[in-house]
Amino acid sequence: MAEASPDTLLEIRGLTTGYGATEVLRGVDMAVGPGEIVTVLGSNGVGKTTLNKVLSGVLPAWTGDIRFAGQRIAGQSAARIVEQGLIQVPEGRKIFPNLSIRENLELGSYRRGKPNRARNLERIFATFPRLKERAGQMAGTLSGGEQQMLAIGRGLMAEPLLLILDEPSLGLSPLVVEEMFGLIRKLNADGLAILLVEQNVVQSLEVARRAYILENGVFAMSGASADIAGDPELKRTYLGL
């Protein structure tokens, strides 16, 4: 296969994978460019989590190719993928509740970013003042929104080239969801490429440049977010709006 375009940070071609004998992703093609926010939308059970798992090296690809920053990462270990700068903030936060906020953040630089740990920690605290105020507090005592901030901060400690956010608005109040999407805009304005995997259709389309709609293991539609948001037939057929 030809090398990925220098304008492409993440490139997926013909990806299939699944569990046991069950195929979940059935030939997926997508790309994320440097500095882009791209969103993958779809309801529960369509393959979003499976896509994240295979991108992170937790689940092997059956066929197809995945390239990140010009390098083939299909078949690489999860640790090696993290070391290259593809960082995922998983659904459900997955923080360490019995460790402090500071300890959770420091663990984010375990595989990548360790030489700049102190500097990055100050940057995270500047972005999330509430975390700085409570740096010694046990993470499990934080609210849902604060835990999500911590999870994102932990991901940023690894100096990502691409940050995958898996359902960052899940279970949060509307006010905190607004705050979360504001944060996503700010991180992107600072140059960070983001792959946003979400069920929150309206706000995801507002924040992303391009969108892919996942349905039954394939991308049923893709294009500019503004085009998808403005097409009533697409919204009715694929997004349930």
Image: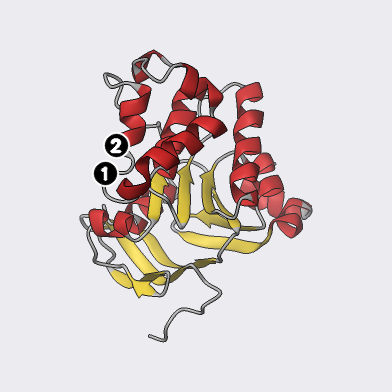
Which residue has dot 2 on it? 107
Query: Is there CB contact under 8 Å for labels 1 and 2?
Result: yes
Measured as percent of width and height from the top left, residue 116 is found at 37, 47
Can residue 90 be seen in the rendering of this structure?
no
Location of residue 130 with respect to 155 vertically, above or below: above
Is 30 on the left-hand or right-hand side of 73? right
Can residue 102 be seen in the rendering of this structure?
yes
Of residue 59 and residue 145, the one placed in the foreground of this image is 145
Measured as percent of width and height from the top left, residue 131 is found at 47, 23
Kindly identify the residue that appears in the image at 42 percent across and 83 percent down: 3
Looking at the rendering, in which quadrant would you find the C terminus? top right
- Find the distance from the CA under tag 1 to the CA under tag 2: 5 Å
Which residue has dot 1 on it? 110
Kind of residue indicated by mark 2: Leu
Q: Which image quarter: residue 119?
A: top left
Kindly identify the residue that appears in the image at 39 percent across and 56 percent down: 86
Is 24 on the left-hand or right-hand side of 77? right
Of residue 228 and residue 8, the one placed in the foreground of this image is 8
SS of the residue at dot 1? loop
Q: Which mark is residue 51?
A: none
Looking at the rendering, in which quadrant would you find the N terminus? bottom left
